[in-house]
Amino acid sequence: MDDEAVSILSQSKRRLTKLKLLSNFFENVDIISIYIKTDIIHKLFEENKTLDYNKLELFHLQYTDSLIELLTKIKKKKENDLLAVINEININNQYIEAFEEKKVDSFETDRKIYSGIFSQHLRNLYKDLTEDKFTLNWNDVLYFQKRYGAEFYRTEADEAKLKAHAVPSYQYQDYSIERKLLGKLNIHQFKVRFVCGFRINRNEYELFKIFQSDEHFIFNVEEKRMYLINDELSYLNTSENESNQISIINQLKRKNEALEETIDERKRSLPNDVETVLKDYLRNLESIDIMSKIFDVNEETNILRAMLNLNLNN
C-alpha cells in the first residue's frame, strides 16, 4: 500500500470518528445507519488492497464531508440552546437553595397551637357575653395573622365568597359574632380547627372548621366579624397554606423537571428538511448505484479494450 493510500485510509478513519461522535450526540436512527453504512464502505477498502483508494476519497468528498459539516453546524446550535437550558436550571437551583435556607418550619406547629388558643378565646367570649362583661384581649388571637399572614395566607380567591351577609349577630366591644354560629360553637364545646388564611388586597380572612362537624366559619380580621360560611366554601381553595417561599421553590423544581425532560428531546429533534435529507442520503448509500460506482468495472474494461485495439492496429 503506497503512502497516498495510507493517507486516504487515515483520513477516512478520522471522518468515521467524527461521524460516530455526531451519531452518539443526536441518537438519530438515520444518522446511526449512515455511520454503519459508511464504516462498511471504509472496511471494504481497508480489507481489499486491489481497490482504487481514490474512489474512497471521492466518496467522502461527495457524501461524508457534506454530512459532517451539516451535522456539526446543527450540533453547535443545539449545544448553545442546551447551554441556555442548563444555565436556567442552575440559576433555578441557586434560588431554590437560597429559599430553602430561609424556609419557616414553625408554621405547621403554630397552626395547631393557634387552633387551641382560638377555641379558648371563643369559650371566653361566650362566657363574657352570658355574664355581660368584657375581659378578652383580642391580641391573644391577632398575633397569628400578624406573624404569618403576609407569607402564608392565600392571595388568590374570590373575596365576595369570603364576605358576610347580613345576619343577626352579637356585639362584643368592636367585634361581632353571628348568633347562629355562637350557638353551634356552644353545642360543640367551642372546639375549632384553623383551616387556612386568605389575604386579599390586605384584607385578611381566617377559615375555621367546627370540631366534629361539617360547619365552617370565617373570622374577618379587618371587619372584626365572625360568621358561618356554607355554599361559598365550594368556590374556595381550602387546602393548607404554604409559604410563599415554598410555593416558589415548588414552582422552580417543577420547571427544572420539565426542562430536564426536554434536554434529550432537544438533542434528538431535527428540522423536517434535515430529516428528509438524511433519509435521501441513506437511501443513496443503500442503493446499488453508489456501490457500482465504487466497484465500477467499466473503466477497467474500457482501458483493456483500448489496449487490445492498440495491439491489433499494430
Image (cartoon, grey):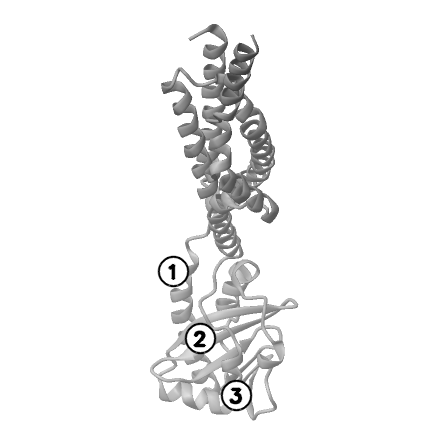
Q: Earlier in the sequence, mark 3 or mark 1?
A: 1
* Residue 207 seen anywhere in this rendered image of the structure: yes
Q: Callout 2, which amino acid?
A: His
Q: Earlier in the sequence, mark 2 or mark 1?
A: 1
Give the foreground label among 3 and 1. Answer: 1
The residue under label 2 is 121
**Contact between labelled residues 3 and 2, with CB atoms less than 8 Å apart:** no
Would you say 65 lies left or right of 30 here?
A: right
* Residue 18 seen anywhere in this rendered image of the structure: no
Local secondary structure at mark 1: helix
Q: Quadrant of the C terminus?
A: top right
Q: Callout 1, which amino acid?
A: Thr
Label of residue 96 in the image: none
Residue lying at 46% horizontally and 80% vertically, measured from the top left:
125
Question: Outermost residue toward the left?
Answer: 212
Residue lying at 51% horizontally and 29% vertically, measured from the top left:
293
Could you say which is closer to the camera, residue 67 or residue 6? 6
The residue under label 1 is 109
Could you say which is closer to the camera, residue 216 or residue 294? 294
Local secondary structure at mark 3: strand
Q: CA distance from mark 2 to mark 3?
A: 15 Å
Q: CA distance from mark 2 to mark 1?
A: 19 Å
The residue under label 3 is 178
Residue 95 rendering spot, x and y as whole percentages: 53, 43
Could you say which is closer to the camera, residue 222 or residue 176? 222
Residue 143 rendering spot, x and y as whole percentages: 51, 63
Could you say which is closer to the camera, residue 107 or residue 147? 107
Position of 183 relative to 252 (above/below): below
10 Å neighbourhood of mark 1: few (<14), some, or many (≥20)? few
Residue 180 rendering spot, x and y as whole percentages: 48, 92
Q: How many marks?
A: 3
